[in-house]
């Protein structure tokens, strides 16, 4: 009698095949992840370009960029506003982002957090979110218990802390007795040298004496997460909120700095939040951060978008964040 051989794999052959497949997956996965991140970074760049177009179209219509923040909540000896509502640049540019429906739904006689504006501030606008940030679906619950969406792109508030740029006459030191100069995190004095955005004042290209190609207009931040149950808030990326550092960044520290942000509402190390330390109210500042490898995307005042490495010289980054400092910047320094 003849015996026909059985067809199939031996155990050793099967294990070898599995091992080869595992090695191929291990080699392929980083490449796939890199390709996905490249696509997300490209989308992030495009979002900033669209925001740049919106800012410049607003400028063309109004001869200025929008106010960084506004409302009766913040008044100054040098400039008193009769506008009772609180809001930021994020609502002002909606018509120029092809979001006219949202703009028409805003009740401008009320502050952003009022119940009548809930539908507006709870609508997710893709142009405000970087796809590399896993927290783009996060919802901020403020002290008023009104929920709102957050975002990854914020306005440039200058080279110093928040309260110095938050003055309509650009001199600093008016609100909360902000010191100018003040001793920054590197132990050196920092003097406020102007910013494209401020509180209750609209600034234009003519106010950017350093040149639009040498001055940042917007940059990325990582959305800060609140603890469950609203026990502690993190306002970084709270773009509709006019309070403190919510919708802004400062050039005090370079992109993705390991030094902590300084702000009055700080929630760290909860979740994926970047480092921070609670400072009360003065001085407060937030640096630009992202989930991109090695740097952040940022929008210059001329409308161009560039990727700035985390290794950029802090002095150069500070000069890019000022609008009237007169610093000399070489094109190969960033």
Image: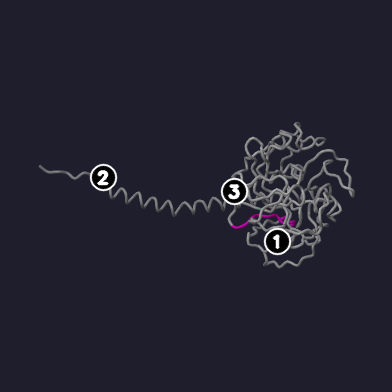
Question: If you read the primary sequence from the N terminus, does the residue marked by circle 1 or circle 2 appear first?
Answer: 2
Q: Name the residue beneath numbered marker 2.
A: 8
Q: Name the residue beneath numbered marker 1.
A: 186
Image location of residue 94, percent across then percent down: 74, 42
Question: Left or right of 310: which side holds 172?
Answer: right
Question: If you read the primary sequence from the N terminus, does the residue marked by circle 1 or circle 3 appear first?
Answer: 3
The quadrant of the picture occupied by the C terminus is bottom right
Q: Main secondary structure of the magenta part?
A: strand
Q: Residue at x 60, y 46 (%)?
A: 272
Which residues make up the magenta segment?
Answer: 294-303
Where residue 188 sits, quadrant-wise, is bottom right
Question: Left or right of 41: which side holds 198?
Answer: right
Q: Nearer the viewer, residue 189 or 95?
A: 189
Image location of residue 133, percent across then percent down: 61, 47
Residue lying at the far left of the rendered structure: 1
Q: Name the residue beneath numbered marker 3.
A: 132
Please state which of the two labelled residues, at mark 1 or mark 2, is closer to the viewer.
Answer: 1
Please state which of the two labelled residues, at mark 2 or mark 3, is closer to the viewer.
Answer: 3
């Amino acid at each position: 009698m003849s015996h026909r051989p059985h067809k199939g794999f031996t155990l050793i052959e099967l294990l070898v095949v599995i091992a080869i497949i595992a090695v191929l997956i291990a080699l392929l996965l980083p490449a796939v992840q890199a390709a996905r991140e490249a696509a997300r970074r490209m989308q992030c760049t495009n979002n900033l370009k669209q925001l740049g177009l919106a800012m410049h179209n607003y400028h063309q219509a109004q001869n200025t960029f929008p106010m960084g923040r506004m409302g009766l909540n913040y008044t100054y000896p040098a400039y008193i506003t009769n506008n009772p509502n609180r809001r930021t640049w994020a609502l002002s540019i909606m018509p120029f982002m092809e979001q006219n429906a949202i703009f028409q739904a805003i009740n401008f006689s009320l502050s952003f957090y009022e119940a009548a504006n809930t539908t507006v501030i709870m609508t997710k606008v893709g142009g405000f979110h970087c796809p590399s940030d896993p927290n783009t679906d996060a919802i901020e619950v403020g002290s008023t218990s009104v929920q709102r969406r957050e975002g990854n792109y914020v306005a440039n508030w200058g080279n110093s802390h928040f309260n110095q740029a938050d003055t309509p006459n650009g001199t600093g030191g008016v609100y909360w007795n902000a010191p100018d100069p003040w001793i920054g995190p590197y132990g050196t004095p920092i003097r406020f040298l102007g910013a494209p955005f401020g509180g209750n004042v609209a600034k234009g290209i003519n106010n950017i004496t350093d040149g639009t190609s040498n001055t940042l207009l917007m940059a990325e931040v990582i959305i800060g997460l609140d603890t469950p149950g609203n026990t502690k808030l993190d306002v970084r990326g709270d773009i509709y909120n006019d309070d403190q550092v919510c919708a802004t960044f400062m050039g005090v520290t370079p992109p993705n700095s390991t030094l902590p942000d300084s702000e009055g509402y700080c929630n760290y190390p909860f979740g994926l939040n970047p480092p921070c330390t609670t400072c009360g109210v003065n001085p407060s500042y937030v640096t630009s951060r992202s989930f991109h490898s090695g740097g952040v995307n940022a929008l210059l005042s001329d409308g161009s978008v560039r990727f700035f490495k985390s290794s950029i010289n802090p002095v150069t980054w500070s000069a890019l964040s000022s609008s009237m400092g007169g610093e000399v910047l070489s094109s190969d320094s960033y």
